[in-house]
Image: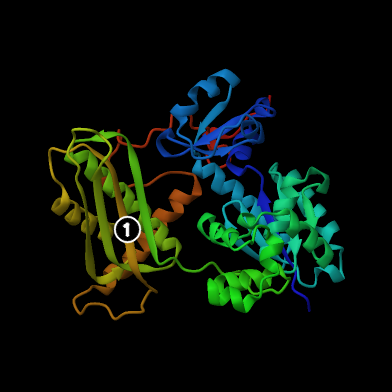
Amino acid sequence: MKRVFALVDCNNFYASCEKLFRPDLKDRPVVVLSNNDGCIVARSKEAKALGIKMGVPMFQVQADIERYGVVCFSSNYALYADMSSRVMSLLEQEAPQVEEYSIDEAFLDLSGVAAAEGLLSFGQRVKAKVDKWTGISVGIGIAPSKTLAKLANYAAKKYPATGAVVDLMAPDRQRRLLALVGVDEVWGVGRRLSGRLRAQGIHTALDLAQVDPKLVRREFSVVLERTVRELNGVSCLTLESVRPVKQQIICSRSFGYKITEQRELREAVSKYACRAAEKLRAERRCCRVVSVSIRTSPHIPNEPFYAKTLSVELPNPTDDTRDLLDVANVIFNRIWRSGFRYMKAGVMLSDFYEHGALPTDLFDSATHNTKSKQLMTVVDHINQSGLGNLFFAAQGVTPQWSMKRKHLSPCYTTQWKDLPLVR
């Protein structure tokens, strides 16, 4: 049976989520800012039309923002994650296998779907369903390989006449599109690699597809060889329906202002340790290594720079927030130095194990392990229910060091108090 893949990609996802509950912003330019409202990380189509670039610091385009009435939002991760979950759940209703490639992209395995429904018709129906049920507009590219599905999705967004759905199963259509697309638009071909390819006369995706795969492997890599084969409709990349287990978990943020007090910096480290522990339990893993890092800004003239990271290996792997907090606090005390203005801290967990994969310490209490699991389960359940919030005192009651988010929108879908009202 011939393999068939679809790539579903949400259009301007962060900006679309912000506009979803603000009908007054329908045709207005919108941008979403990074942590501490620093740089522009998402733009609506209206903002793109104004020439506002991705990744540019906000202060550099402040004049354009005021001149054109651009609406700015701080990153609302809770809103984006919830809307992503809603989109993905709809896709899982329509396809036998779904790979969540990113927060706003998913690959679908449509092998066998053509026997029951035309692929173009399927794509149009799924697009209409996602648009109607979530309010998020998507583009869909369909092809015999994941790399071609990426290019089909590119065409679905670039050419309005496609209706945002492109079926690229036919070889002649594949060739026509490949001839129009620059080699730098091919999935997995970055700026540096595209420069090397152009130096050898390979300027378009079609040029790359026509190169001998064995020569590509010899001159470049086996990864690019697979890309060439995929451009010719040979499926080399399978669908990862089961998300790979993370190898490490990092929680790190820049602060809203420079921290000089030990207590405040300790609270920040504790906050990140608690968040990392929550993510660790979501992975159903325990960790054996805890790392803590603190640093000042290297860009302030005439101000001393200090950065330090220290790791500690635990006697027994754990996912208990209390254990991880204790270790993080010990590490913090070792690396803290007074007399500096700290701008960032972070906690990293690594060396993961499944529960019970290693024998426990002879003196480790089995009762403690049982109660630990029960307690952490209760804490996670309450915090994820939206009905309340449990936190450890080490995090601080009213932290002032949190990152700057002056333009934060309500959590419309995850907080009862932020539920939109229709009058």
- The residue to which callout 1 is attached is 348
State the residue lying farthest toward the front.
200
Query: Left or right: 95 with respect to 220?
Result: right
Residue 46, image x, y percentages:
66, 31
Q: Work out which quarter of the rendered image holds the N terminus and state it.
A: bottom right
As drawn, which residue projects farthest toward the top? 67
Residue 218 percent location from the top left of the image: 54, 77
> In the image shown, does 365 or 265 lie closer to the viewer?
265
Q: Nearer the viewer, residue 247 or 274?
A: 247
Q: In the image, what residue type sits under mark 1?
A: Met
Mark 1, secondary structure of its residue: strand
* Identity of the residue drawn at 80% across and 65% down: 169
Q: Can you give x and y, in whole percent of width and height, for residue 286 in the image?
A: 35, 68
All told, the count of numbered labels is: 1
Whether residue 222 sits left or right of residue 255 in the image: it is: right
The 10 Å Cα crowd at callout 1, few under 14, some 14 to 19, many 20 or more, is: many
> Eyeballing the image, is 336 above or below 73?
below
Residue 189 appears in view: no
Q: Residue at x 23, y 33 (%)?
A: 301
Which quadrant: the C terminus?
top right
